[in-house]
Amino acid sequence: MRIIPLLISTLITVALIILLSMQWGKVPPIGKFLSPQHGFWQNADPIDKNFDESVKLPDLAGKAEIYFDDRLVPHVFASTDEDAYFAQGYLHAKFRLWQMEFQVYAAAGRLSELIGRKALNYDREKRRLGMVYAAEIAAKEIENDPTSKRECDAYTAGVNAYIANLKESELPVEYKLLNYKPEKWSNLKTALFLKAMCYDLAGSENDFERTNAKTVFGFEDYEKMFPAAQDSVDPIIPKGTVYPPAALSVKQPASADSLYFDIKDSSEIVPQKPKKDNGSNNWVVSGKKTKSGAPILCNDPHLGLNLPSLWYEMQINTPSMNVYGATFPGGPGVIIGFNDSCAFGLTNGGRDVMDYYEIKFRDETMKEYWFNGAWKAADFRYEHILIKGEPEMIDTVAYTVFGPVMFDKKFSGMQRRTNGNYYALRWKGHDPSNEFLFFNKMDHAKNYDDYYAAIHYLHTPGQNCLFACKNGDIAIWTQGEFPAKWKRQGEFIMPGTDSSYMWQGMIPQQENPHLINPERGFLSSANQVPADPSAYPYYLGGDFPPYRGIIINRYLNKWSNLTPKDMFTLQIENYNVFAEMARPVLMKNIDMNSLAEDERSYFDTLANWELHNDPELRAPTLFVVFWDTFNKVVWDDEFSKTKLPLVYPYASTLLEAILKDSAYKFLDNINTPAKETLRDDVTLAFKKAVAICKLADADGRMQWGKYKGTKINHLARLAPFSRTDLNVGGGTNCINATKEDHGPSWRMVVELTPKTDAYGVYPGGQSGNPGSPYYDSFIDTWAAGKYYPLWVMEKDDVKDKKVKYHMSLMGYTTNTRP
């Protein structure tokens, strides 16, 4: 009889083993996840974890010595560039592998493989956007150039060397939670990462919503709502600059009035799009404005705030370069930083390089489309989308002379339904280019001529490329391959039946806005318009935020004898110049006689505000709520005429309109018999804002830092791995452009004295492991507006007390480097 309990016990044990090895819905296999040897317990790094290591690896031709300082920043020393890039790939994989791969999965439209059908529409849109198609073209360009091929091959080999030696217990915790394992890296994945960044920085793209606005309101009112140029212009290249006539003549199609401006067309499609706030600040002051007599260059790119951070800080030293700065886990080189001779920074150019065309197919097979008076054969890509727990889906995507047909009768995006039309995308990111040569040459640059040669390789995304050199030169180029457009081209869906609406060429390189060694002693960019639209010979579009540029230039114009500490102060400046311009006209038009006692108290709060968005103040919250409410009071009656997707006009449009014209047409509420005035709208908006703020006061959230609620989310939106409720000031229109989950992602200040004096910080940490003390170790310093000295290590500093760990990578050749 003893055998029966034994059999029962054995069966229960087997059943438990089977059950614990299975995934149940979103829950990973419990047995594996909780395993003391292999599960998530292994991801908890002790505070005193030792990173000393000596590793022999194939495909490393020589060796790389890596010294980690007390912030876990690696200082890589190698005898060749290729060995340094190998080490960089190895380090990126060691500390950021899951982040690298997850970002590439997202870019390639492969999230359904990890989380199932709920990601299917997202994946389909990424496939139809042509992300992999663009990356394939870029990978060919990379591999056709010997310099970029060697660089990316070495980087890829380094990533794969780490993956090949990765134990199951060492897998990042996200792999264990999602129950999958890393794939081998490739140059295509590096190209994919680059194209994801190109897309994020693609500039304004509201073609469908703008088309709806033109149809609903008519072109005359559209021009009032979305002017082609702003009044508040303090461009990157100062006003008064004289430009030669355009070398490229651009002609508006003869049919534009009937087929483009006056046609009534609409769509409920709302494509995925980059965050509209993706931008940055950068500026450089020449030696004549600094205390040391050396240039000081500053940069703080404004991007999504995530954990692990977008950036990974490091130094790379070889016989041909000694460069330090912010790198992208996913690609080789330093992106924003400095070397022994110069410093360089970037802000987004913001130009529209994505346009949609309506395609006329012969029938629903989409095999032929009408173009230039004949039926033209379409090409096809068959996108195999793997779905976790389900059969794969094959999505057929037609390609035209413009690009992929993103939206058709079978797919209309994430949320909306199609109108039965076909829309193809023309995106500059699909064109051949090799931006890794830009980064490579900037990392090696020694003077202005090297910088000028490097920027020729930056095609997309267009950037404002800032430069300073120890010989005293400073320069900025708004650089990229920008389509030369006729006025308003690409703001609406364009006809795709002939070539007359296609881009007619790219603005010649030499005609991109630029300035070298200006008399005023400084250069700056903050995503404002690059040149005075009334003087520059090419159409620029109107979607450029002007206010950060205005206040930066105001300070730099009046300051002198500057030091890096002054630059810290400027980067974290919370002064709201938009509020400076808007508050007087708003407060002047509040009907004081209609205000209750509690409303008058809020009025006094706003009147006494010194216009700084400091986190402990209540007034910034009141102003932001007041303006947002006023914006809705003005526009929502017009917008109620339709259920079509629309976008609000720019804040600058409304502010400039009420400053010029107190009888601005859109102040009247079209849904009432009365004719509302500016005074009526402002007073109503203020009363509504007070009601909202009283609730915030009651909840203890009225202080700006609490109301804004800055947070840094984990990439997979895993709350336990995120940081929330950071008490940080700033916001839209402040130099410190910190918003809820977006803002300065890397602050850098570099003084180019004989021995470079540099500082920086980013809101994250060097490790991507949530169980590591280095996961979020910089966040509190960043939130406090403080900086770390950026230590440029010399070869003789190996005994310096700043060196905390030493890793040695040694190679043995197998000749398998891709």
Image: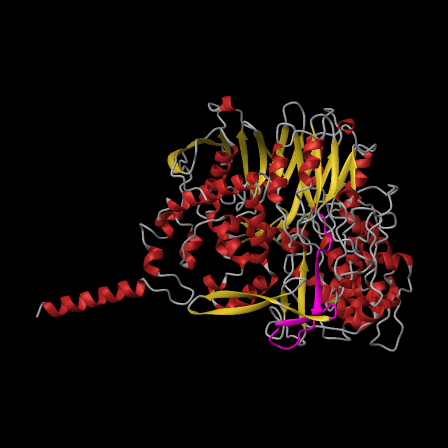
Q: Residue 549 or 435: which is nearer the viewer?
A: 435
Q: Residue 385 or 698: which is nearer the viewer?
A: 385
| Above/below status of 152 relative to 794 | below
Image quadrant in which you'd find residue 234: top right
So how many labels did they put on this image?
0
Image: magenta residue range? 348-373
Rendering colour mode: secondary structure
Image quadrant in which you'd find residue 808: top left
Q: Which residue occupies 40% across, 59% down? A: 179
Q: Position of residue 556 (x, y in %)?
A: 78, 36
Q: Residue 73 or 479: which is nearer the viewer?
A: 479
Task: Give yes or no for residue 416 being in the magenta stretch.
Answer: no
Is 190 placed left or right of 457 in the picture? left
Q: Which residue occupies 86% across, 41% down? A: 241
Which quadrant holds the N terminus? bottom left
Task: Give yes or no for residue 372 being in the magenta stretch.
Answer: yes
Is 679 placed left or right of 528 in the picture? right
Using the rendered image of the protein, determine whether residue 495 is visible from the camera's viewpoint: yes
Is 495 placed left or right of 254 in the picture? left
Using the rendered image of the protein, determine whether residue 609 is visible from the camera's viewpoint: no
Q: Position of residue 489 (x, y in %)?
A: 78, 60
Q: Position of residue 525 (x, y in %)?
A: 75, 43
